[in-house]
Amino acid sequence: MIYIGIGSNLGNRKKNIEKAKFRITQNKVNIINCSNFYESLSWPNIRHPKFLNIVLKIDTNLTPLELIKVCKDIEKSLGRKESKRNSPRVCDIDILDYKKKTINKKIILPHPRLHQRNFVLLPLFELDKSWKHPVSKNHIKKLIKYLPNRDIRSIKQI
């Protein structure tokens, strides 16, 4: 399976994510399942607007590099501008897990920080309760258990 995360914390967040989902399907990607929306504090600066996030379970014949190019093109088409890392954005699309592959050239898979992020782990758990991290082999329940309490308390399903 392939899992991607989509987030937004500028403008109409839900509409931005829905537009991204639609454009993804126009690029040889089939959405198999979609999590609920999750709202979380912006990271690392909690003064920035809150994020809305989802995780998609998808299928595609695109390679990881082709898929990330599609994702980056969609981000730009929705108005994402080049800016400082972790600054507010209209749309952010990340490949979280691509068929359990481990890649460290041009693209890093699985996503290097997915195991630390409440806004990835909780929607991913909703879609796949038996998912295991491709590198650490830790079960998703264990990864969620390792999240700080404030990360669990500060996220809500919408």
Image (spheres, rainbow, N blue to C red):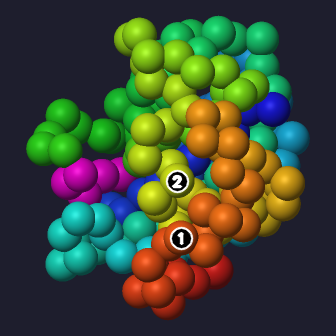
Q: Quadrant of residue 4?
A: top right
Vertical arrangement, residue 157 with respect to residue 98, above or below: below
Q: Which mark is residue 42?
A: none
Queried whether the magenta region covers residue 149, the answer comes back as no
Q: State whether residue 67 appears in this view.
A: no
Query: Outermost residue, bottom direction?
Result: 153
Q: Position of residue 130 (x, y in %)?
A: 85, 54
In which quadrant will I find the N terminus?
A: top right
Residue at 19% over, 44% down: 85
The reply to whether the C-beta atoms of the residues labelled 1 and 2 are less than 8 Å apart is: yes
Q: Position of residue 113 (x, y in %)?
A: 43, 47
Amino acid, disc 1: Tyr
Query: Which class describes the residues within 10 Å of circle 2: few (<14), some (14-19), or many (20+)?
Result: many
User: Residue 23, relative to residue 11: is it above or below?
Assistant: above
Who's the residue at 61% across and 74% down the image?
A: 145
Seen from this angle, which residue lies furthest left? 84
Q: Residue 115: give its label.
A: 2
Going from the N terminus, do you reach mark 1 or mark 2 first?
A: 2
Q: In the picture, residue 122 is in which quadrant? A: bottom right
Position of residue 2 measured from the top left corner of the image (x, y, whole percent): 73, 32
Q: How many marks?
A: 2
Q: Secondary structure at mark 2?
A: helix
Nearer to us in this view, 87 or 134: 134
Look at 32% across and 40% down and name the residue there.
Answer: 79
Q: Quadrant of the C terminus?
A: bottom right
Give the amino acid type for the residue marked by disc 2 in the picture: His
Residue under numbered circle 1 = 146
| Span highlighted in magenta in the image | 86-90
Residue 63 image position (x, y, % from top left): 65, 9
Q: CA distance from mark 1 to mark 2?
A: 9 Å
